[in-house]
Amino acid sequence: MTRVPTVLASLIGLAFLALGVTACSPLALFDAIGPRDDGGRLTMRNAAFGPHPRQRLDVFTPVAAAGGAPVLVFFYGGSWKNGTKEDYAFVGQALAAQGFVTVLPDYRLYPEVRFPDFLDDGAAAIAWVRDNIAQYGGDPRRIVLAGHSAGAYNAMMLGLDPRYLRRAGVDPKVVRAVAGLSGPYDFLPLDAGTATEIFGEARDKAATQPVSFAGPHSPPAYLATGDADTIVRPSNTRNLAARLRDVRVPVQERIYAGLDHSDTLLALSVTFRSKAPALAEMAAFLRQHSGGERVPARTVNR
């Protein structure tokens, strides 16, 4: 494949992602024909972790792994209104190339559901991981969570508030570390838009905020954003990082100069990896706290 269409698809995907258009958008084109890390591969597609059509997940595995690898569950964003795991295969493959057995779940979306139903979906996906991931070479005792934007919120809530995993029959201690890219963690009072639609019916608004659950037993956290993010203010990252540091939880906080809301996600891709070292830094942090060993990543234009 020539470089021109690959770069064109990447630029189209970037433009639409910046506008918040993900489902059925050119982001799928970006994912489909952009260059990929070939150190990871899709091993399982559409495994069911519940009865709903959106309770399905994909599994990506490291090519070089021999078994017992750390497991990373990645939640994509989309304002809890849109998104599909198929558009984020480049993320699954990139993280698998870093040595993680990587799981990309879908989850139910607004207006069908509101808070906290999508968190229960995430917890159910983690329960599936605990019960099934060993057959894909992953160690169910070494699970880490990550996400971008609304997906970063999901990852943080599942890591910090133990109620959702317990409700799914999972010991919260199974989550060894969490990572969030450009996530909303401290956004009260609710604005009149998406936040009110998704969280407005919650009786206890403080219980919708990841920052409310930062405590001494929280898992280590990697928190990154861009200082040019106008979608989710960088103060969300700064506030949660400060709260975790106050209770002596290991935190790596990164505010990337010049990056906007979509850049932190696209920096995981081969095409835009030069924007920021988000992939390498996040993977190193999660690997350190999961006990994993580094698997050298390889890339190929396809």
Image (spheres, rainbow, N blue to C red):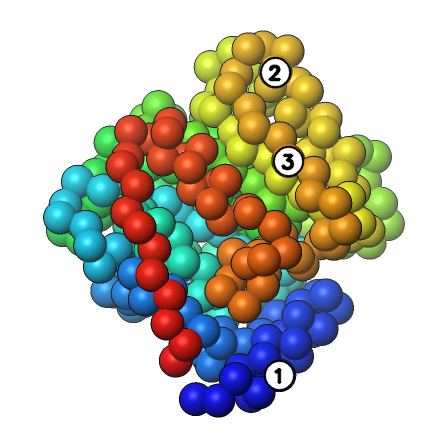
Q: Which residue is mark 2?
A: 245
Give residue 243's quadrant in the image.
Answer: top right
Q: Residue 81 appears at what percent x and percent y?
A: 64, 61
Q: Are marks 2 and 1 in contact (CB under 8 Å)?
A: no
Q: CA distance from mark 3 to mark 2?
A: 14 Å
Query: Looking at the rendered structure, which numbered label has been put on residue 8?
Result: 1
In the image, taking residue 157 as reference, residue 11 lies left or right, namely right
Q: Secondary structure at mark 3?
A: strand
Q: Which residue is mark 3?
A: 254
In the image, taking residue 51 as reference, residue 183 lies left or right, namely right
Q: Secondary structure at mark 1?
A: helix
Q: Earlier in the sequence, mark 2 or mark 1?
A: 1
The residue under the point 14% across, 45% down is: 67
Residue type, numbered disc 3:
Arg
Which of 124 and 252 lies nearest the eye of the viewer?
Answer: 252
Image quadrant in which the N terminus is located: bottom left
Q: Residue 86 appears at what percent x and percent y?
A: 44, 71
Residue type, numbered disc 1:
Leu
The residue under the point 69% across, 34% down is: 237
